[in-house]
Image (cartoon, rainbow, N blue to C red):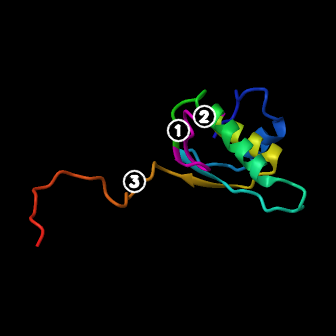
Amino acid sequence: MNFEGLTARWPGRLIRSMESLNIPSSVKFVMIVASQPPKLHPAVDLGTEWRNFLSSIQTTEMKYAPTKKIHENVWLINLHTGLPLLGELLCRAKDKAIPMQIVFLHEEPDWIEYPPPFESAPEVPCP
């Protein structure tokens, strides 16, 4: 995957680390899961840092191509249209020491919804 042309705001080290992953060209999506970091010092208010991180990402999401936000801390990003958002997520997470898990996907997941969406069905009388 070619990461050239990403904005100059991202550290070259980050771009090189993304390139070093040797992501196969068949990978089309990434699922990113951000985790609230463990509290290492009692004086640190991680709740505020975590909320600041999530709100900054929410603002950033609006600037880029549509991305599926699965939960407040989980994103499904199309690699062909969402590289800028991916770079922003990784940079901001690194700045705030937010652990990130990345799952590489060859196609968009076919989600199973539970409970299934309501479909109009013939009324069945209750016993």
Number of other residues with Cα within 10 Å of mark 1, as a class: few under 14, some 14 to 19, many 20 or more = some
Q: Is residue 19 visible?
A: no
* Element carrying mark 3: loop
Q: CA–CA distance between discs 2 and 3?
A: 23 Å
User: Residues at badges 2 and 1 in contact (C-beta under 8 Å)?
Assistant: yes
Which residue corresponds to the image point at 71% horizontal and 50% vertical from the top-left? 21
Left or right position of 30 against 21: left
Left or right position of 71 against 43: left
Please tell me whether mark 1 or mark 3 is closer to you in this view: 1
* Element carrying mark 2: helix
Q: Which residue is mark 1?
A: 67
* Residue 39 is a magenta residue: no
In the rendered view, tell whether residue 47 sits above or below residue 80: below
Which residue corresponds to the image point at 62% horizontal and 37% vertical from the top-left? 58
Quadrant containing the N terminus in the rendered view: top right
Q: CA–CA distance between discs 1 and 3?
A: 16 Å
Looking at the image, the residue that sits furthest to the front is: 127
Which range of residues does the magenta coloring cover?
Answer: 69-84
Q: Which residue is mark 2?
A: 61
Which residue corresponds to the image point at 57% horizontal and 44% vertical from the top-left? 25
Instruction: Specify the amino acid type for callout 2.
Output: Glu
User: Residues at badges 1 and 3 in contact (C-beta under 8 Å)?
Assistant: no
Nearest to N terminus: mark 2 or mark 3: 2
Residue 59 on image: x %, y %: 64, 32
Instruction: Specify the amino acid type for callout 1.
Output: Thr
User: Toward the viewer: 65 or 24?
Assistant: 65
Q: Which residue is mark 3?
A: 110
Residue 92 on image: x %, y %: 76, 41
* Element carrying mark 1: loop
User: Toward the viewer: 69 or 31?
Assistant: 69
